[in-house]
Image: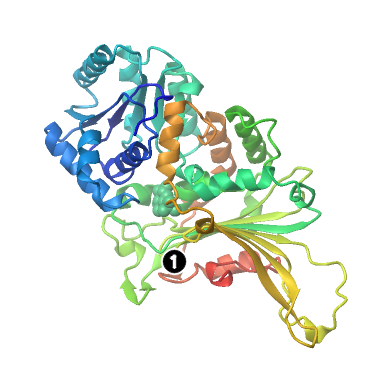
Amino acid sequence: MQNTKLEPVIFVIFGATGDLNWRKIIPALYNLYLDGWMPENFSIVGNGRTKYSDTDFRNKMLEGVNKFSRKGKAESESWKNFSEKIVYLDGDLNNSKCYKEINAKIKAVEKEWKQTPVIIYYLAVASKFFPVISQHLKNEKMTGEKDKTRLVIEKPFGRDLDSAKSLNNLLCNLFDENQIYRIDHYLGKETVQNILAFRFANSILEPIWNRNYIEHVQISVTEQLGVEGRASYYDDAGALRDMIQNHLLQLLCLIAMETPVSFQADEVRNRKVDVLRSIRRFKPEMLKKNAVRGQYGQGWIEGEKVIGYREEEGVKPQSNTETFAAIKFFIDNWRWDGVPFYVRTGKSMNQSSSIISIQFRDVPHKVFPDETIDNWRQNRLIISIQPQMSIQLQVQMKKPGLDMTLNTVDLAFHYDSISEKNTPEAYETLLLDTMTGDQTLFMRGDQVEAAWDLLMPVLNLWESKKSLDFPNYGAGSWGPELAEALIAQDGFHWFSTLSIN
Ligand code: BG6
């Protein structure tokens, strides 16, 4: 099944022998193919340093599909048809010969199709190669038609404000902003996209979506996994760069943004940048009360003994890198004045879950006698992104019985209740958007810079002042005690999946 409405496309994947390609990109493209979302004419050109024949490379990709695809093992006939479109060219990214060969391949395919395809250069490589590749693409005149050539860039986009600015400058000299697709895979998640639909397609929410009704917001992305063999990247990055600068701030933007004029990419992205710009900047003296870092030591997760961060392969024995971060933000605008937004993320924690909890203000006057309200809880809206995909509104109800006792119950919507189909993976959504040229779910250059700008005081402080208490939380726990104190000082507590079932 193929989509006749989509323009022909050539994906050129740099870093094709890497983990991302066989785990995410190829399985996503294959699933798009199976579901009829690939154009009639498409081609995938993989590039890497290792030498592979086309057949060996296709077999390696098949292993990835069989292992990681949400649809399970590939069926032989459809895989055969799909994989015929994959070719592999090895080459050194620093050598123009590599690009000339790719270009020759593109030209040959164009000739065969007798059509000008959309060309998507996917940079699934370490960030140090971003400038090298983009410059070569320009030098070899491979960026020709602006509305048909696109560049997809994975994170990390810079490691601080200055490096992000120089990368933006360099890329914007070579490409137009509307050719650059900066990936934040969180934005492709079905549940994350639904935040926009839920907020802006339901009229009952708008009147209460503000400081008059909302007391505080929590965004919590916790993972049971540790650094998973990625120490060479992670030990230089840490939780703030790896998760908060991108995924968590993007979630915050979706919750806090104003209604866009339309669903057009720049309208949505303008409103998100407004949020980032409105977040109160940290003065050095504010940081102690508003930002907490942590690093895991040994512990137990699901009954298994887990080593501490500093014992992980590739991590410096005295590493000062945070594997946990919690921050309290304020958004200084009319809608959110005085409403704290707490975000936290960490590795090797008690549970893997991504949850947004929006707590509403309490009723102004409780008319019920004390003995009826033992289980009283303020209304809360819980958007569970993963692993459970749901939206729940916690409300008070009368417990059935002759006496008046109140209880908290959920008005709940579960994704699997309305769709028999497997939910598409984030990469499927994002890759389809790159083909159709829709940048709504991609980060614009100014958004990335605004996020770095906001976090620079925290990054600078944490880098310049070693934490003396690391490791300060055990693997399998909920993070350092100071993170509890961060929220408890305001009379709240962190919300977890345990609380929603
Ligand atoms: C990535 C981070 O961007 O997101 C990883 O680099 C993290 O460290 C991952 O584990 C989490 O993504 P997900 O989709 O598993 O929640």
Q: Which of 472 and 30 is in front in this view?
A: 30
Query: Residue placed at 67% from the left, 72% from the top?
Result: 409
Task: Tell me: residue 315, above or below residue 176.
Answer: below
Q: Where is residue 166 in the image (x, y as percent from the top left)?
A: 46, 27
Which residue lies under the disc numbered 1?
A: 349
Query: Residue placed at 46% from the left, 64% from the top?
Result: 468
Q: Nearer the viewer, residue 456 or 38?
A: 38
Task: Tell me: residue 1, above or below residue 212.
Answer: above
Say which quadrant the N terminus sits in.
Answer: top left
Three-letter code, disc 1: Met
Image quadrant in which you'd find residue 152: top left
Crowding at dot 1, Cα within 10 Å, few <14 / some 14-19 / many 20+, comes out as many
Image quadrant in which you'd find residue 454: top right
Q: Where is residue 235 in the image (x, y as percent from the top left)?
A: 36, 51
Q: Is residue 369 left or right of residue 18?
A: right
- Residue 280 visible from this viewpoint: no
Query: Residue placed at 54% from the left, 33% from the top?
Result: 440
Element type where label 1 sits in the image: loop
Q: Position of residue 480 (x, y in %)?
A: 51, 68
- Residue 229 visible from this viewpoint: yes
